[in-house]
Amino acid sequence: MGIDARPYREGSLAVVAPIAGSPAEKMGVKAGDLILHIKDEKKQVDLDTMGMTLPTAVTHIRGDRGTGVILTIYREGVDKSFEVTITRDEIIVPSVELKFVEKDGKKIAYLELHKFGGRTDKEWTIKVGEIVAARPVGVILDLRNNPGGYLDGAVFVASEFLNSGVVVKQEGRSSSETFSVDRKGNLTTVPLVVLVNKGSASASEITAGALQDNKRAKIVGEQSFGKGTVQEVQDLSDGSSLHVTVAKWILPSGRWIGKEGITPDVKVEDDPETKDIDEQLDKAIETILN
């Protein structure tokens, strides 16, 4: 269906980000939405999500291709909750997409990273090669609605733009580990802007925060999600599961991602009324050119 979700502090389920091009995104599900209720007549599911564990919610939301599920959504700024009917489908999304934007006779590379997955490194390296060959005046790295993924993917991507320095520290109760730039990047000097929003989480926040703290990039967009913990899942005897926080992600400046997420250098809110205009991308282009 194409939703990355996390348990929310009030006990419901929060959408971190809909996957680009997924059935959920096409039906208007947005980052930050709260899923209050799941209904699927075929599976005989009709349940509130309050207190529901994430694995249980995933089991209820997933289903056969072509079947439907009804989600009751609460969205900040909307007076009443509303229902969204989503038809399940197979989801195949590339980790990385690249295009070039022409503005005032200048070429800018626009690099969208949808997830930090197992194929990210290979796809990323191919796209970076295309950027190097094109010699653009700047790069825009779009991490909006990227829910994260592997830590080593975040270190790999950040290392593309940094000559040296700390990327992130994993701080546990009794030990800590520092992850630093681990390779020679190909884009260490080109002007860089990173786009984030409230759907940017986990590895996305590590990458954006490392580039911001090392003064390598300007961050444009909205406050990110704030997923700054490492959790282990413990299965309980009654069939439920317990998520236990075992460590925190600390950025080079000492900031904890989980406290408030990444604060943009240039704040630009997405205007839902202007679907054909991407104000955040426009500001990123303007920032590169200036």
Image (tube, grey):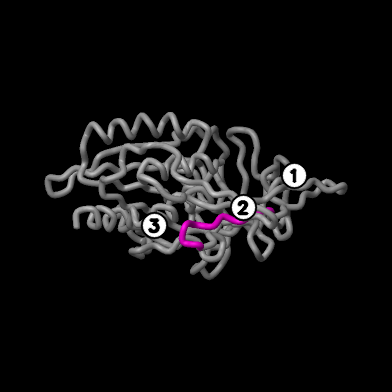
* Dot 1 alpha-carbon crowd within 10 angstroms: few under 14, some 14 to 19, many 20 or more: few
Left or right relative to 160: residue 224: right
Element type at mark 1:
loop
Q: Check the image and report above or below for 207 versus 224.
A: above
Element type at mark 3:
helix
Marks 3 and 2, the one that precedes in the sequence:
2
- Nearest to viewer (mark 1 / mark 3): 3
Towards the viewer: 182 or 273: 182
* Dot 2 alpha-carbon crowd within 10 angstroms: few under 14, some 14 to 19, many 20 or more: few
Towards the viewer: 16 or 106: 106
| Type of the residue with mark 3 | Gln
Towards the viewer: 61 or 162: 162
Towards the viewer: 111 or 35: 111
Q: Quadrant of residue 80?
A: bottom right
Q: Are marks 3 and 2 in contact (CB under 8 Å)?
A: no
Q: Which mark identifies residue 176? A: 2
Element type at mark 2:
strand
Q: Which mark identifies residue 212? A: 3
Magenta part of the chain? 246-254
Where is residue 170 shown, x and y percent of the image?
A: 58, 52
Q: Is residue 201 magenta?
A: no
Marks 2 and 1, the one that precedes in the sequence:
1
| Type of the residue with mark 2 | Ser
Quarter of the rendering occupied by the C terminus: bottom left
Q: Are marks 1 and 3 in contact (CB under 8 Å)?
A: no
| Type of the residue with mark 1 | Gln
Q: Check the image and report above or below for 249 versus 96.
A: below
Q: Check the image and report above or below for 137 versus 212.
A: above
Picture residue at 39% right of the left edge, 46% below the top:
164
Q: Which residue is mark 1?
A: 44
Label 2 – label 1 distance at C-alpha: 46 Å
